[in-house]
Amino acid sequence: MKLKDKLIQAYKDGATRGLSFEAERAKHIQQLEEMGFPTIKDEEWKYTNLLPILKKDYQLSESISKVTAQSLEEYILTDTDTHLVVFVNGQYSEELSSIDDKHACICSLAEAEVKKPEILKKYWGSCLPENPDSLVALNSALSNNGTFIYVPKNKLVKKPIQIVYITNEVSADLFLQIRNLIVVEENAQVQITERHQNFDGKEVFTNALTEINAAANSIIDFYKIQNDKRSCSLIDNTWVNQEKTSNCTVDTFSFGGKFIRNNLSFLLNGEYAESNMRGITLIGQNQLVDHHTLVDHAVPNCQSNELYKGIFDDNAKGVFNGKVMVRPDSQKTNAFQSNNNLLLTDSASIDTKPQLEIYADDVACSHGCTIGQLDDEALFYLRSRGIPFKEAQAMLMYAFTNDVLSNVKIPELKEKLNRIIAEKLGVELNIEV
Amino acid sequence: MLEIKDLKATIEGNKILTGINLKVNAGEVHAIMGPNGSGKSTLSSVIAGREEYEIEDGSIDFNGSDIMELSPEERSHKGIFLSFQYPIEIPGVSVSNFLKTSLNESRKAQGLEPMPAGDLLKMMREKMELLEIKKGFLSRSLNQGFSGGEKKRNEIFQMAMLEPKLAILDETDSGLDIDALRIVANGVNKLKSKDNATIIITHYQRLLDYIVPDYVHVLYDGKIVKSGAKELALELEEKGYDWIIKEAEGK
């Protein structure tokens, strides 16, 4: 059976049903049925071919498996106090999670149906467009669990929240729909990290969707660490709605996995709001990372800052598509976008496309993309100081990513990312942060 | 220490060096002067091992062995140091970390263990004092946001740390105000010994008031067209390069 038919059948069978929203789900499954999966003929998927991944024969759910806290340690921050939300094979793991939710409600989405039904009802799907693409529709139709974070008015969640989606001891290749809902009320603040991690080398394909609601004056920092096994594919849809004077950051660090597509979308819906999106992509072999971003300046006086850096080795392929929309009345918009790439081999590639649609006349918008190699002069400089070629290259690549990394606000995370980068570059760099 | 014979180099088909002969002994200071485009910076890059240049002919021996096939890092490990005219900015890599990497890579090449952190810090402090560098300097990103003077001082600081046998100072005086020039020159002078040698590449005579050369060479059109004692620099300052060019072309 083709994957699409299998998914529709699963919906009809009610096999993956967990949450409510029946009416919405019926609509979404119909959207999937009508649209089908995107192909390279779709403008938004021109450079990224999903077909090979869709061809696999996936199971759509898997029972929870035994994972020890110790085996988890490598993938989480352990040197600082955090809230830890862990799912195994798409199921919430009470055993591995550790949450103290005095100031916020942090739980699984399934649990939120009982704990915060009114919040769930109000916000589930609220960030999504009326006619979403088929992957968003699929997630909405079939997702039955994920993480729920609700931070009430004036509350500060002091410890970062770490969300980890583990897959382990999977009996056959697995296709998961993961759903996160984050609601941060007025004047509240939270820091979140998220990671999808396979343990057993099976082919896992995750179609994740996160909705972030940033109420007036809230501050949200969301860090995505994408460093999964090479057998795994991820489509990560993130939709952010921001109200006035809110400040929301979504940083994406892509190192691992076979195939990653990030769809990150911000709607600036209240004046003086600020959106930040940054990314480091550091891949090789036959990996692919595709960043599609959209910033919709729907009201005046907002600011968006976008900075993506990519380093591509071997046959790796990158895609960057940054769309910025400035609506007719959105005067005094500041929108900055920059995408810089290093290609280390002749067979690595990047397709980069800034896409600005500006309908207001009193705005400051800029964009720039660069594709280049490491600077010979800089390499010579380091080598003339006795630093061998490979280390010199690594140092320059590290420096290249530094302005993204320097913005990470959790010191332990910054250190961890530093270590991952040094490891990826194949050097020991004692670079302090 | 350094012996260059009939060195010819090109870049992208353009002849830059057309037959350089130069011998530098331990304990000596040589100044290489010349108008813009005469090949001064190329010469320093070629000695340090920059790979973009094509060596057509000639040889470079350093302490009795041919270094033509050595990489820039290997030449550095042998004791050649080039102070850059335009030092490169490396964001996110602190001065201290860079120095630590640089010094320990050199030690590794010589079969030595990394320098203990305490010793390294002590050495850095001593050399910083020599160059009147302030304390916070070590934790700044390498050359990023440095003023012209700070960049050049940082170059000489690195030189002081690496203790090279041969130091080539490429236009170290450019962009320096008089105080910075004095500090840099003072640092270079203090590092001088009977065992090491210095080549100063400069456009102007100014730096040579502070670092007095034993020999002055004039480079023109990729060749050394005149050599002399330190007085030659003064003569050049007074009369410019035209008379030497005429003399060279008349030959």
Image: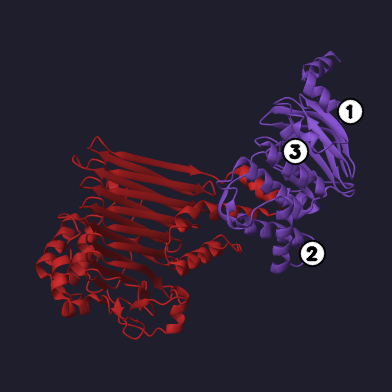
Chain colours: A red, B purple
Check disc 3 and report the residue beneath it.
B44
Q: Which residue is pictured at 77% across the width and 44% down the height?
A: B186
Q: Amino acid under label 1? A: Gly
Whole-Å distance between the Cαs marked 2 and 3?
Answer: 28 Å
Tell me the chain of label 1.
B
Residue under the image location 73 percent in, 43 percent down:
B184
**Chain under label 3?**
B
Disc 1 crowd rating (10 Å Cα; few below 14, some 14-19, many 20+) is few
- Give the Cα distance between marks 1 and 3: 20 Å
Q: Residue at x 64, y 42 (%)?
A: B149
Q: Nearer the viewer, residue B242 or A122?
A: B242
Picture disc at residue A76: none
- Disc 3 element: helix
Mark 2 and mark 1 lie on one chain; the one further toward the N terminus is 2
Q: Position of residue B182 (x, y in %)?
A: 73, 41
Residue at screen point 39% across, 59% down: A252
Question: What residue does disc 1 label?
Answer: B228
Q: Helix, strand, or loop for circle 1? A: strand
Checking the image for residue B111, the label placed there is 2
Label 2 crowd bin: few (<14), some (14–19), many (20+), radius 10 Å = few
- Mark nearest the camera among 1 and 3 is 1
